[in-house]
Amino acid sequence: MKIEMKVNGKTVSGEIEGRTLLVDFLRKDLRLTGTHVGCDTSQCGACTVHMNGEQVKSCSVLAAEADGSEVTTIEAMQNADGSLNTVQQAFQDYHGLQCGYCTPGMVMAATALLKDNPKPTEAEIRHHLEGNICRCTGYHNIIKAIMAASGQDVQAVAAE
Ligand code: FES
Ligand code: FES
């Protein structure tokens, strides 16, 4: 079947099978490999993108379901001049990543959170990230990064 959608502001189309997942369309057809696949059980959140402004796990969405929608991936998150945006910079500044595998999904999830809740509490951040797994950081620095990105006092983040 033929699908068409807007990805990172550009209209794209493709010929897909009905069972094709959005994450595979993004990675294989569009070569947007910043969206990662970390599991086959819809648990890890490495594949998180925004669809019509809402965060979704792109391994849990059929590409056909995204037909006609607007999708944003990590590739479009930097500032217009190519520099890291506020959330990305905070991840770097507060060491919110180690191997980086979970990071695109974390950034997309954090961005969605801050859009709806610009000053989340630590508990709200932890709750929001329940669908995003990180095997490296222990989450502490990710929480700090998101607190910093929202202009809040990082010292207030509870010690591990
Ligand atoms: Fe989508 Fe793990 S790859 S949740
Ligand atoms: Fe390695 Fe999160 S930084 S999985």
Image: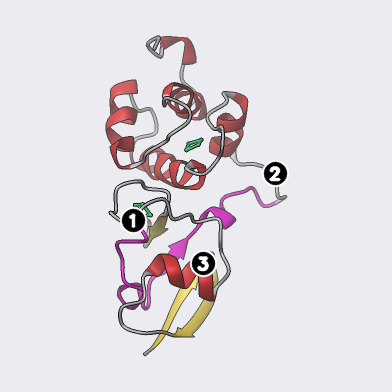
- Residue hosting label 3: 27
Viewer-side label of 2, 1: 1
Label 2 lies in ligand 2 vicinity (Cβ under 8 Å):
no
Residue 61, how many percent across, how many down? Answer: 31, 66
Residue 8, how many percent across, how many down? Answer: 53, 64
Q: Residue at x 31, y 72 (%)?
A: 62
Q: Secondary structure at mark 3?
A: helix
Q: Does residue 91 lie above or below 158 as drawn? A: below
Q: Are marks 2 and 1 in contact (CB under 8 Å)?
A: no
Q: Which mark is residue 83?
A: 2
Residue stretch rendered in magenta on the structure: 56-80
User: Nearest the camera: 10 or 107?
Assistant: 107
Alpha carbons under labels 2 and 3: distance apart: 23 Å
- Residue hosting label 1: 56
Q: Counting other residues with Cα less than 10 Å from the Cα at mark 1, is it few (<14), some (14-19), or many (20 or more)? A: many
Using the rendered view, name the quadrant where residue 120 is placed: top left
Alpha carbons under labels 3 and 1: distance apart: 15 Å
User: Nearest the camera: 157 or 26?
Assistant: 26
Mark 1 residue type: Val
Label 1 lies in ligand 1 vicinity (Cβ under 8 Å):
no
Q: Residue at x 34, y 30 (%)?
A: 125
Mark 3 residue type: Arg
Alpha carbons under labels 2 and 1: distance apart: 25 Å
Q: Is residue 125 left or right of residue 84?
A: left
Q: Does residue 127 lie above or below 80 as drawn? A: above
Quarter of the rendering occupied by the N terminus: bottom left
Mark 2 residue type: Ser
